[in-house]
Amino acid sequence: MGDYQTALGCYHESLKIRKELGDKKGEAWVLYNLGRVYQTLKNYGESQRHYEESLSLAQELGEEELKTNIRNTFSEIRG
């Protein structure tokens, strides 16, 4: 397994930067990636929280690819 704690740290730093820059598209993708890492770590509460925040931004921005990715990932979590 990879170094997921390092990945989480990098993604959280990236999220902070994206927010400071006002890069909502980048923010949405980072949130999605955070959700994936938390899902891998079986922290489903954090995973779902990040997916939901990402989906909200994706809907606001009309990011169809991201919305599809999130919906597919939700189905993985829910079985």
Image: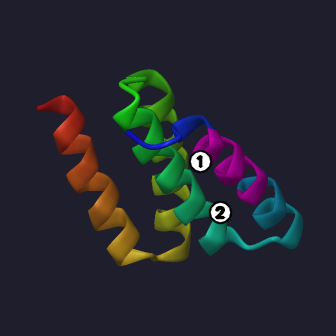
Looking at the rendering, which quadrant does residue 44 occupy? Answer: top left
Q: Which mark is residue 38?
A: none
Within 10 Å of the Cα at label 1, are there few (<14), some (14-19), or many (20+) other Cα atoms? some
- Residue 55: image quadrant is bottom left
Secondary-structure class at tag 2: helix
**Along the viewing direction, whichever of 7 and 78 lies nearer the viewer:** 7
Is the stretch drawn in magenta largely helix, strand or loop?
A: helix
Q: Residue furthest left?
A: 79
Residue underneath mark 2: 27
Residue at x-position 41% and y-position 46%: 36
Residue 12 on the magenta segment: yes
What residue sits 26% from the left and 49% below the top?
A: 73
Residue in the image at 23% along x and 34% along y: 77
Q: What segment is highlighted magenta in the picture? A: 6-14
Magenta run includes residue 61: no
Q: Nearer the viewer, residue 39 or 56?
A: 39
The residue that disc 1 covers is: 7
Q: Residue 68 location, x and y as percent?
A: 27, 65
Foreground disc of the pair 2, 1: 1
* 72 relative to 76, above or below: below
In the image, is residue 67 above or below residue 53? below
The answer to whether marks 2 and 1 mark residues whose Cβ atoms lie closer than 8 Å is no
Picture coordinates of residue 72, whole percent (x, y): 21, 54
